[in-house]
Amino acid sequence: MVGLEERLDALLDEEWKVCAILYYGRSGSFLLHSLLDSHPSLISLPFETPGVHHYFGDWSSFRTNAFEKMKNAITGIVDKSTKDAFHKIDEKRFLDIMSGFFVRDRMVSKRSFFIALHVAYALAHGESLDEIERSRYILYQHHDPEAFSMRELAKDFPEVKFLQTVRNPVQTFGSNISVTICNFKPYPVQPSLMLHIIRDHVYAGGGDDDMRRRTRAVRLEDMHLNTYPLMRGIAEWLGIAWDDVLMRSTKNGLVYEEDFRRPWVLDKKHEDLLRAFDVKRLKALFHRNAEAWGYDCEGVMSCEQLCETIRSSFKFYKHLDFAIHLPMHEEPRREFDIMMHAYAADVRDGNMAPRFDVVPFA
């Protein structure tokens, strides 16, 4: 009879599939993870596990004391006070299994450690080793749609598929900057950070042909309003059997007391940060994503008009440090305007990667 250590060791050499979830601003990546969380063919870590989001992009620094770092990350979110039953696992079993993977002096690689981490957590959580061996399918909250990290993941797992959650671009931008401004209070936001956020909303959601083949966009609106047909489409695309658990938000297999699906979030206008004219310009700035993902683009201002007006202030500028300290900081504002015009010019000239397709469903 094959022992546990031999079975664990064999898993590191098997072919594995990975479904990696990406975000586009505040677009429901944790909600999507929660809907897939309990599927019997998938194993995963809690979606907010510290450090895991940057695993493939930062392995060169992560590999030093990797076991210690992930032990601290996992045990740090284990329930110590009964407040959070979602994270409750057998801590000793998790550490024993992780150690058991590498008792044969196997070289610890980025791929082997990633598999071991997920299998050890799943077994410590009480999942079946037989089912894990049959499915060999990891659900991973990759989170950041960073091209280098995505390519590194694809090198180790050639069959990886990416699900990028998306949302009406103007609405997700409003939500993103609202949270950013709130997090910085009572201090203003640095213009460089705001430019980074804007750049992500303009350019994220594209990629080379290989990434496009592997990736589908999942609309937040569909997660809230068309859950059943959407999840059937996702299950078919991922190659997993339909299961009614795909209709429930869970974490570590436990149902949330309050469902993640809150359709009222789709109606937020963020009028405290965006005037009507701001919304009109942002629709034009983000329209290539909006059009590709099936959002209404009727009446969008022309790219030429966008380039002509993009340097005018947006309402949210009052929360940036150059807006608070004018006229002393005129130079940062001028540089900010130059970058905004460059983004608008790229949209006008089509200097952007093609967008990912949306998950189809009937």
Image (spheres, grey):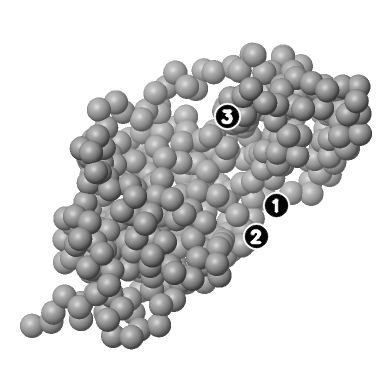
Position of 33 relative to 189 (above/below): below
- Residue 183: mark in rendering: 3
- What amino acid does circle 2 point to? Asp
- Find the distance from the CA under tag 2 to the CA under tag 3: 34 Å
Q: Is label 2 in contact with label 1 (beta carbons under 8 Å)?
A: yes
Residue 280 seen in the current view? no
Q: Residue at x 67, y 26 (%)?
A: 187
Q: Is residue 174 left or right of residue 247?
A: right
Local crowd size for mark 3, using a 10 Å CA cut-off: few (<14), some (14–19), many (≥20): few
**Left or right of residue 49: residue 23:** right
Q: In this view, does 186 lie above or below 34?
A: above
Question: 92 or 199, which is in the foreground?
Answer: 92
Q: Residues within 10 Å of mark 1 (few under 14, many from 20)?
A: some
Residue at image location 37% in from the left, 57% down from the top: 72
Residue 9 can be seen in this image: yes
| Gap between marks 2 and 1 measured at Cα | 7 Å
Q: Which quadrant would residue 341 be assigned to in this image?
A: top right
Q: Which-is-in-front pick, marks 2 and 3?
A: 3
Q: Earlier in the sequence, mark 2 or mark 1?
A: 2
Q: Image quadrant for the N terminus? A: bottom left
Give the residue pinned by disc 1. Answer: 353
Point out residue 14 in the picture as x, y percentages from the top left corner: 32, 76
Per the image, the residue denoted by label 2 is: 208
- Say which quadrant the C terminus sits in: top left
Q: Residue at x 71, y 23 (%)?
A: 319
Q: Foreground: 146 or 57?
A: 57
